[in-house]
Amino acid sequence: MSQRYDEDRPHEKFDRPRRHTRPRTKERPSYADADDGWVIGVDRGRYTLLVGDDERAVTAMKSRPLGRKAVVVGDRVRVVGDTSGTPDTLARIVEVEERTTVLRRTADDNDPIERVIVANADQMVVVAALSDPPPRPRLIDRCLVAAFDAGMTPLVCLTKADIGDPTALVESLVPLEVDVVVTQHGGDLEMIRERLRGRTSVLVGHSGVGKSTLVNALVPDADLATGVINAVSRRGRHTSTSTRVLPLPFGGWIVDTPGIRSFGLAHVSVERLLAAFPDLATAAEECPRGCLHTPDEPECALDLAVADGTLDAARVDSFRRLLASREGSD
């Protein structure tokens, strides 16, 4: 028979047992002896880093104090533990250095959750095919918006010029003052090598545009798988499945990313995009409060600047094209 509660019994016996743990201190370790590392790959919670002057490859995990803070490819980090890089060793990432650039995207234009693609890259290379699959100018525009928002230099690389005409696409990008390189299968790549040399460039493009083929030509040791185009949908299949950093034999680094189907821009505001165009931003200072700088704005200062010859109409139209690309599907 169970013992019933007795009001006369000492209540202390019914107290919840206390945990015998030391009180948490507000002092945190300084990690003065931590090594500097650069994240070049992420795979199921394990991070591949380059550590030390000899750039040895080290496998690491994220420390608990970092909480949910994401560690992404391109991050500069502080790492402790076994950083020898020998097999079956594991180091620990304890700090993430401040990022110079952050390339983000959202799943769609209504998704408030940002996903960081890569950190600390200084150039985005938008790879697009001229045919097979056909080019998607709207997706190119959206990638350019993300590059401008991240503070990265955009470069458009048009592939498969042997089976497609680049003229129209190149002309559409002239007012935006975006550099364009045109390549073809088996052709000379010196022009794109010159623009990649000494820089950290992230390659972005949808599946089947020849991104892996381009990487294999630039980095012979990469040995990336190349895909084929679906004969019905004219779309490619994903060949790169994760983001990783590859060294260029002529100097610099490229960040290869999986092919994208869409590029959500819910995180990009009109003001941040406008800031990437100093001449337009200066003219827009005369706009009335709340102006969205679209063609139907009755008193937009961009239109007044075009009328008096201060701004080029084609450049304003191209900027508004980027604004329009922020809404709707790719």
Image (cartoon, grey):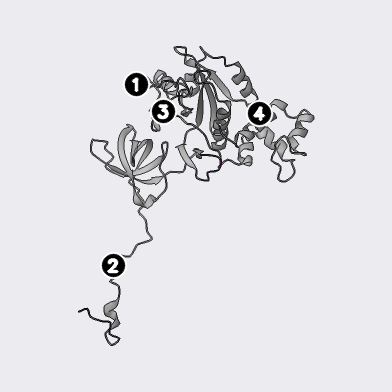
Disc 4 is placed on an element classified as: helix
Query: As shown in the figure, which amino acid type bears the numbered disc 1?
Result: Asp
Residue that appears at 47% across and 40% down: 116
Task: Quickly name the residue at label 1.
Answer: 221
The crowding category of the residue bearing disc 3, from other C-alpha atoms within 10 Å (few below 14, some 14 to 19, many at least 20), is: some
Q: Is residue 58 magenta?
A: no
User: Which label's residue is closer to the chain start, 3 or 2?
Assistant: 2
Task: Quickly name the residue at label 4.
Answer: 318
Residues at discs 1 and 2 in contact (Cβ within 8 Å): no
Q: Nearer the viewer, residue 117 or 235?
A: 235
Can residue 312 be spotted in the picture? no
The label shown at residue 19 is 2
User: Which label's residue is closer to the chain start, 1 or 4?
Assistant: 1
Q: Nearer the viewer, residue 263 or 134?
A: 134
Marks 3/4: CA–CA distance: 31 Å
Query: As shown in the figure, which amino acid type bears the numbered disc 4?
Result: Ser
